[in-house]
Image (tube, rainbow, N blue to C red):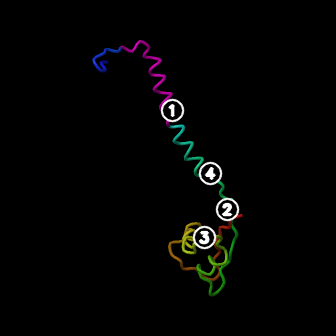
């Protein structure tokens, strides 16, 4: 290899290869450890309660009752996702899982 007019020769190719592997490993470790640290934070554990839908209930009413420090539309989306709902239609007697942070 020639750099700035000087010729360099790798004497210990094995050491160079190990060095490169260690550097790549270090980069991956730093990248993925920051992802884990960032996502694990101080989030509260989520539990679920069962709610049986009464006549006249809407997701908006249920979300208003159980949401904590969350914008109501996001909480309704979360309710629909947890309960595998394609639409916001609910009927008397339906049983919903309600996420509660605690």
| Residue 26 location (% of width, % of height) | 52, 33
Measured in 3D between alpha carbons, the distance from the residue under mark 2 to the one under mark 3, in whole angstroms, is 14 Å
Q: Badges 1 and 4: C-beta atoms under 8 Å apart?
A: no
Q: Secondary structure at mark 1?
A: helix
Measured in 3D between alpha carbons, the distance from the residue under mark 1 to the one under mark 2, in whole angstroms, is 34 Å
Judge whether residue 57 is colored magenta: no
| Residue 61 location (% of width, % of height) | 62, 81
| Residue 66 location (% of width, % of height) | 67, 74
Query: Would you name the residue on which mark 3 appears?
Result: 70
Of the pair 56 and 2, the residue shown nearer to us: 2
Q: Which residues are magenta?
A: 9-27
Q: Quadrant of the C terminus?
A: bottom right
> In the rendered image, which quarter is residue 64 located in?
bottom right
Query: Would you name the residue on which mark 2 appears?
Result: 46
Residue occupying image coordinates x 55% and y 47%: 35
Measured in 3D between alpha carbons, the distance from the residue under mark 4 to the one under mark 3, in whole angstroms, is 19 Å
* Above/below status of 81 relative to 31: below
Q: Badges 4 and 3: C-beta atoms under 8 Å apart?
A: no
- Please tell me how crowded label 3 is: few (under 14), some (14-19), or many (20+) other residues with Cα within 10 Å: few
Measured in 3D between alpha carbons, the distance from the residue under mark 4 to the one under mark 2, in whole angstroms, is 14 Å
Query: Would you name the residue on which mark 4 appears?
Result: 40
Which comes before the other along the chain, label 1 or label 4? 1
Which comes before the other along the chain, label 3 or label 1? 1
> In the rendered image, which quarter is residue 90 located in?
bottom right
Which comes before the other along the chain, label 4 or label 3? 4
Q: Secondary structure at mark 3?
A: loop
Q: Which mark is residue 25?
A: 1
**Residue farthest toward the top in the current orientation of the protein:** 11
Of the pair 93 and 13, the residue shown nearer to us: 13
């Amino acid at each position: 290899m020639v750099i700035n007019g000087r010729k360099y020769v790798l004497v210990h190719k094995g050491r160079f290869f190990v060095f490169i592997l260690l550097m790549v490993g270090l980069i991956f470790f730093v990248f993925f450890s920051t992802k884990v640290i960032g996502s694990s934070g101080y989030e509260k554990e989520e539990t679920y309660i069962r709610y049986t839908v009464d006549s006249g209930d809407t997701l908006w009413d249920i979300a208003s009752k159980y949401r904590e420090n969350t914008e109501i539309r996001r909480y309704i989306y979360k309710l629909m996702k947890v309960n595998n709902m394609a639409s916001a239609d609910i009927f008397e007697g339906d049983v919903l899982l309600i996420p509660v942070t605690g």
